[in-house]
Image (cartoon, rainbow, N blue to C red):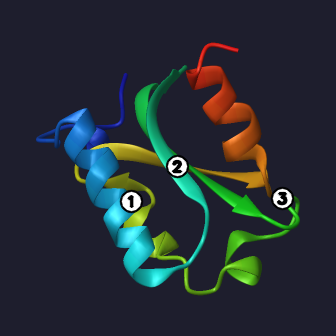
Amino acid sequence: MANIFFTGEKDTKEEAIKSVGELIKSYCDCVCQAQVVSDDGGRALEIMVEVGQPTKSLQEQKPEFPLNDIVPKWHGWRAIILKVPVGYIGTVVNAMEDGY
């Protein structure tokens, strides 16, 4: 049974991606990318954030990142933060979007 916390009204996929990106940019100068993904819990808003050491906490590396505003729910979407190494979004994610 799904958790009722995540039920109810939600922004469209495009609105959620745009608004979370705007929020992050207003707080933090960091490389990030949001997208909607699916996992065993259903569809979720995944926010990738590039950090120097993905094994360390996000708050330790990016104290200005608005983590508590985004997680666990952003505009009706279950939100997941994914820490990735510096250069990952530009090199790997964008290359996959370009069809490589």
Q: Position of residue 73 (x, y in %)?
A: 35, 54
Q: Position of residue 75 (x, y in %)?
A: 23, 53
Q: Check the picture and name the quadrant holding the N terminus.
A: top left
Q: Quadrant of residue 12?
A: top left
SS at circle 2: strand
> Pointer 3 and pointer 2: residues touching (CB < 8 Å)?
no
* Amino acid type for the residue under numbered disc 2: Gln
Identify residue for label 3: 54
Identity of the residue drawn at 35% across and 59% down: 20
Identify residue for label 1: 21
* Amino acid type for the residue under numbered disc 3: Pro
Hey, which residue is sitting farthest left in the picture? 9
Q: Quadrant of residue 19?
A: bottom left
1 in relation to 34, above or below: above
* Amino acid type for the residue under numbered disc 1: Gly
Identity of the residue drawn at 38% across and 59% down: 21
